[in-house]
Amino acid sequence: MPPYLLSRGLDPVLGIFTGVFAFYLHETHPRTARPEDQRLLALLRWKYESYQQKKQGELQGELLKNEGAV
């Protein structure tokens, strides 16, 4: 087993921090930055909005179904 860089508990934290920081720099650096509509945050917003619309449609469908049964 390879030796630890800092400690057994701190090495994974350092690895996660380094990866997140590298991703942030890749997304925001002027030379490598993607257009605003192609970034991860825009994708997450789009997915969340589509999820909300799907749930809204399901709830409205259930309300109409329940009103028809009454």
Image (cartoon, grey):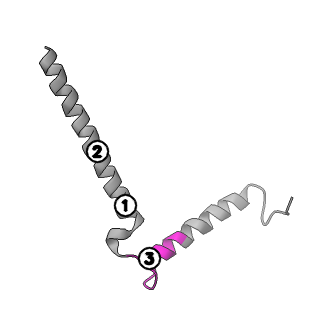
* Residue with the mark numbered 3: 28
Look at the numbered disc 2 and give the secondary structure of its residue: helix
State which mark lies toward you, 2 or 3: 2
Residue type at mark 2? Gln
Look at 15% across and 15% down and name the residue there.
Answer: 69
Look at 67% across and 64% down and name the residue there.
Answer: 14
Q: Does 17 sit left or right of 52 as displayed?
A: right
Say which quadrant the N terminus sits in.
Answer: bottom right
Report, in whole angstroms, how far the alpha carbon at label 2 lies from the one at label 1. 14 Å
Name the foreground residue: 25 vs 59. Answer: 59
Which range is magenta? 23-34
Residue 28 is drawn in which quadrant? bottom left
Q: Does 7 sit left or right of 18 as displayed?
A: right
Say whether disc 2 or disc 3 marks the residue closer to the N-terminus. 3
Say whether disc 3 or disc 1 marks the residue closer to the N-terminus. 3
User: Which numbered dot is residue 52?
Assistant: 2
Look at the numbered disc 3 and give the secondary structure of its residue: helix
Say whether disc 2 or disc 1 marks the residue closer to the N-terminus. 1
Residue 21 is drawn in which quadrant? bottom right
On whether residue 31 falls in the magenta region, the answer is yes
* Residue with the mark numbered 1: 43
Q: Crowdedness of circle 3 by 10 Å Cα count: few (<14), some, many (20+)?
A: some
Residue type at mark 3? Thr
